[in-house]
Amino acid sequence: MYSRSAGLDLLSDNMTTDTFSEIDAEQIAEDLHTILDMVRWSVSCFNQAELFYGHGTDNPWDEAVSLVLQLLHLHQDLVLQTGDQLFHSRLTKFEKLNIIKIVKRRADEHIPVPYLTNQAWFCELPFFVDERVLIPRSPIAELIQNHFEEWLGDSEPQHILDLCTGGGCIAIALAYAFEEAQVDAVDISQDALDVAELNITEHELNQRVYPIQSDLMSALQGQQYDLIVSNPPYVDAEDMDDLPKEFHHEPTLALEAGQDGLDLVDNILRQAPSHLTDNGWLFVEVGNSEVHMFTRYPELPIQWVEFENGGHGVFAIGKNDLVEYWRSVDH
């Protein structure tokens, strides 16, 4: 059985009389011995701080396990392989003090775990992230893993655009999924592209994934793509006001998109026809702003993607339908 008592009295006493920043890390380190002790203590800290979870986990236990194992440079698959045995492993004092320091930052500053460890996973691939880019969490991952089969069939796109690439996660995952394709990774933010370039190099894809600075498609004159995938900023004004503290560590430029969250989407829909090949497809994520799409584009013949693994707010539209829509609207 797991023992969850280590350090509990110390935590409770200090939490009722002091702020977390005044807790004696040395004393905590003396009272906690194993990985399990550290995870349990972290969960208590997270509960006390009333954190928000949404950057890779959805509860304090999984958050603590993820953080502690990453700080110990241990892959979570080891939990499946070793079961209880791994959690009962004892820690060095250096390891304990380091974990305590990072848990303190997570609780005090509400910093998402991927920013604390500089690592996030997308499509089962590891990526470097920091506060220059969003933490990847798009349901588009499921589409990539399924090779967009419902829409592309057996065809293999040769030229792909990842619009608003951020740290390059979608672009790189697309390159893995379509091994013969060239992928342009476009973003307006040079800071984000610097991170994308780090990830492209780390995945040894410099010959197939190309970071390009552009305000949407303005710098892509003459370029056409068989597949355009975009996870643009789409948070509306109301949701921006209600975002938990964790999201305020992410770049505002990558989140907010006007009153209804569709400011960039409108430009994407207008620019896409001239950048899609004849049988090309456009996929755009709009998240909670899906509700505004019906108001702004009641006649747009889009297909909403249904996800098996959770997620919503992603639509698809082919070039021909997009061309016909704008022809009817403009006339």
Image: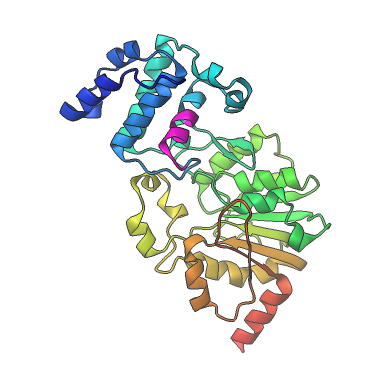
Q: Which residues are magenta?
A: 58-66
Q: Is residue 5 above or below residue 167?
A: above
Q: How is the image coloured?
A: rainbow
- Look at 21% across and 24% down and name the residue there: 14
- The one nearer the camera, 121 or 16, is 16
Residue 146 left/right relative to 36: right
Asked if residue 144 can be seen in this view, the reply is yes
Residue 321 left/right relative to 98: right
Q: Is residue 51 magenta?
A: no
- The one nearer the camera, 132 or 7, is 7
- Residue 146 pos. (x, y %): 72, 51
- The quadrant holding residue 152 is bottom right
Residue 4 left/right relative to 85: left
Q: Which residue occupies the extreme left position in the image? A: 17
Q: Is residue 176 above or below residue 282?
A: above
**Quadrant location of the C terminus?**
bottom right
> Mainly helix, strand or loop, the magenta region?
helix
Asked if residue 208 can be seen in this view, the reply is no
- Residue 83 pos. (x, y %): 57, 22
- Look at 65% across and 68% down and name the residue there: 272
- Residue 141 pos. (x, y %): 63, 49
- Look at 44% across and 55% down and name the residue there: 255
Q: Which residue occupies the extreme front position in the image? A: 1
Residue 204 left/right relative to 214: right
The total number of labels drawn is 0
- Look at 40% across and 16% down and name the residue there: 96
